[in-house]
Image (cartoon, rainbow, N blue to C red):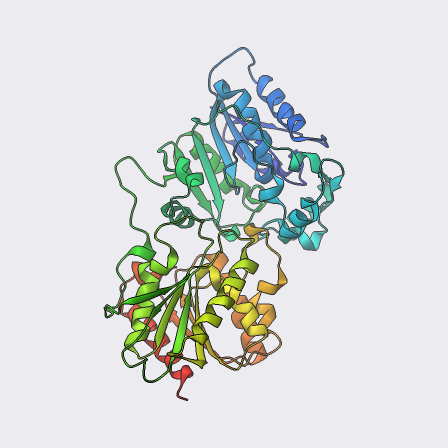
Amino acid sequence: MMEYVLVPGLFTGSQVWRATAEKLTGRGAKTHLVPLGSAADLETHIARVVETIDAIGATTDERDIVLVGHDYGMHPAVGAADRRANRIARIVYVDTAPVQDGAAALATLADQEVRERFAASDGTTGELPPPPREEWQRWGSTAGLSDEDLDLLTTSAAAQPLGTLTQPLRLTGEAESLPSTGVLCAESGATIATLRMLMSFGDPMFASLSRPDVTFFELPTGHWPMLSCPEELADVLLAAAAGQGTSLVTPEEAPETPAYLRPFLLDVPQVPRERCGNIDLYVPEGAETTARPAIVFVHGGPVPAGVEPTPRDWTTFTSYARYAAEQGVIGVTLDHRLHDVSAYPTAAEDLAAAVAEVRADPRVDGDRIALWFFSGSGPMTAPWLRETPPWLRCLAACYPIMAPLPGWGVNDPRFRPAEAVAGGGTVPFVLVRAGLETSAVAATVAEFVAAAEASGTPLELLDVPDGHHGFEGLDHTDDARNAVREAMRRVVERLGSE
């Protein structure tokens, strides 16, 4: 039986692991809770994890330890694994991304406001105070937590020394080849499907996740599964120690073509593109003599910089643009710089500039424009809902993420469509929902729909009951085809005539 070393995360002490440790102990495992305490820097926390490891059969070199970390706790955990790699059988990441040499925890754990607050300072002294009870959701999804769990988090929380968050993690590489497991918490927005999509972008950060000894589990809960579902988490930790879990890419299978590059669910004409800077136009015949309305299709994200092909050339968006041209409307695709969850302001500026360029084209009727958003571009609808120009005739969205997800740490109020629409929107909004959407994304859509209906916004809902996120390349069903046709019909109808 493996020995489990459990490392707590931000603001929390070892007591946060007690319920899970009891479940593991009840199944015959040995557990060790690491009291990180109020050390001034990351290296001191690493040393405390190393001390715990050394106290476990210090004379043996057998790999008998499963090292488990939660959010910030992964930094001292991985640091300790790097120094005692000969003792570690597996590293388990609980609702947090892989950590790398030179990385500081602040960049990945703190919310946007905190990151910006300490960006201009040396950040080596002082403390980050724990959140009050009603603000834990700023640090992760609280889905699944009971009132008692929130009370425990709040009453036992301690300030986090800034030095532990700003000191870069220094690794020798000794632990790079160790087996690892990620425990994904779906209510935080992390799923195996999401990781596979990110891997398809070719981001080097995710290359290490394709090894067969890197596995994943999903839990239908929020950021603190050791409190919300300790028994299920214990089961996962036991299974991880046995090498179980889902591999993103097994040795027997090649990476699948991502959904956005697969054939479109409708046959569309091969309308040629016209490339103008970071936008492409798909122009129907006759636009040279009669100005036409335009639909700008806005890709989601974040999409890492340097991805090839870029989103405006993805099959999903070129097909929508060609389909629009078939309806007599100019279809537009673009590339914007939503390369990171903090880049919504930059991406919004790119979109505004692209729309201005489209409206200035003499073949476009600048008074008849629609914007159609997809997936992670959903928050970018908020500025247009808040201040709708008279030439914007319609907004549309397919399987949108309608608010930054809990795990993103983004709290910019400019990109919260539910808040933007609460004042009463006037622009028609056509929203296509995927019935098999992840729960975290579906919750953002439900919040937006409730706000829109309460404010009297002209919202038109279309559903694909058996559709997945990105259904155009995944679900070639009658329901999906009909939803796309009907959505296009309604948007074109809202564009109207002069």
- Residue 482 visible? The answer is no
Depicted 493 relative to depicted 432: above or below: below
Quadrant occupied by the C terminus:
bottom left
Q: Could you tell whether 29 is left or right of 296 in the image? A: right
Q: How far across and how far down the image is residue 372, in percent?
A: 43, 70
Q: How far across and how far down the image is residue 230, in percent?
A: 55, 41
Q: Which one is nearer the viewer's eye here, 347 or 457?
A: 347
Q: How far across and how far down the image is residue 474, in percent?
A: 30, 58
Q: Could you tell whether 273 is left or right of 234 in the image? A: left
Depicted 41 relative to depicted 422: above or below: above
Q: Which one is nearer the viewer's eye here, 347 or 228?
A: 347
Q: How far across and how far down the image is residue 39, in percent?
A: 71, 30
Quadrant assignment, res 292: bottom left
Q: Could you tell whether 55 is left or right of 428 in the image? A: right
Q: Residue at x 59, y 54 (%)?
A: 410
Quadrant assignment, res 165: top right
- Residue 457 visible? The answer is yes
Depicted 436 relative to depicted 221: above or below: below
Q: How many marks?
A: 0
Extreme residue in the bottom direction: 498
Extreme residue in the right direction: 126
Extreme residue in the top direction: 59
Depicted 449 relative to depicted 77: above or below: below
